[in-house]
Amino acid sequence: MSKVSIPAGEILWRTRGRNWEYCFLLTPGIDRGSWWRFYREVKAELNLSPSGDQAVGKIKDRAGNEHIYLASIYLDSKLIDAAGRETEQFVVWFPTHGNFPEAGVPENLARAWSGHFASIINSKELTNLTDHDEAGADTIFKSLLEKTSVNDAEISTPISSNYRMIDVYHQLDGDLVLVRKKKRTIITPVILLFVFGTLLTYFLMMYFGN
């Protein structure tokens, strides 16, 4: 087993709890707007299973700066929601220094990361939380994380230097510009008939009036 240190500020983590639905507990400090589209684009490239899957890719922020990332996913059979469903753990690491450690990356980052924070996820505060509560799961999680006074997660896991690359063009929110179609003026047969009738009446009155 080896250890790799990963700051929470470099992580995008989407998960759910027993009584609250999926949300992003952590988001990285990269100006991308909404992370929902990125999640869907990356998830489509990964295989969700109990054994997990992960791959490396790149994105650009709104300023055009490129960021490498390691995206990982696995089906968590230990974290069960109130309906008895297993949980999808989706974790993406964006190393601040632009690259991963020379030693490699965790063989399954999603499993290692979610396992590292299992005690917080299973805490009374998050276990009893529902979607109807005022405070969101992300707010409570960050509050509990601050209480631990630990900014970096020391992940103990087998390390791999082999990773699959994915080539995905990730759209920014600003890439999708809604262009309204110009409204066309449609003259219906009824309007045409009315105009024709009015003109015909006018000419008949002029003709017979003389």
Image (spheres, helix red, strand yellow):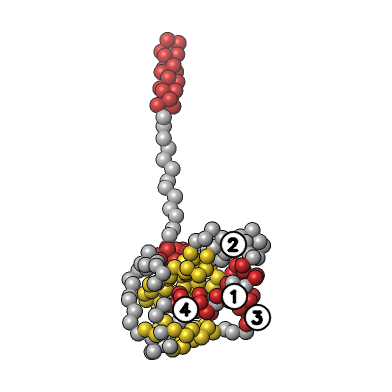
Q: Is there CB contact under 8 Å for labels 1 and 4?
A: no
Question: Dot 3 corresponds to which residue?
Answer: 147
Q: Is there CB contact under 8 Å for labels 3 and 2?
A: no
Question: Dot 4 corresponds to which residue?
Answer: 112
Residue, x 67% and y 62% (percent of image)?
134
Q: Is there CB contact under 8 Å for labels 2 and 1?
A: no
Seen from the viewer's position, the closer of residues 189 and 49 is: 49
**Could you tell which of marks 3 and 2 lies nearer the N-terminus?**
2
Residue, x 58% and y 76% (percent of image)?
119
Residue, x 51% and y 77% (percent of image)?
115
Position of 31 relative to 176 (above/below): below
Question: Dot 2 corresponds to which residue?
Answer: 19
Disc 1: CA contacts within 10 A as few (<14), some (14-19) or many (>=20):
some
Seen from the viewer's position, the closer of residues 60 and 96 is: 96
**On the image, which quarter does residue 132 sit in?**
bottom right
Count of numbered marks: 4
Question: Dot 1 corresponds to which residue?
Answer: 120
**On the image, which quarter does residue 192 sit in?**
top left
- For badge 2, the amino acid type reads Asn
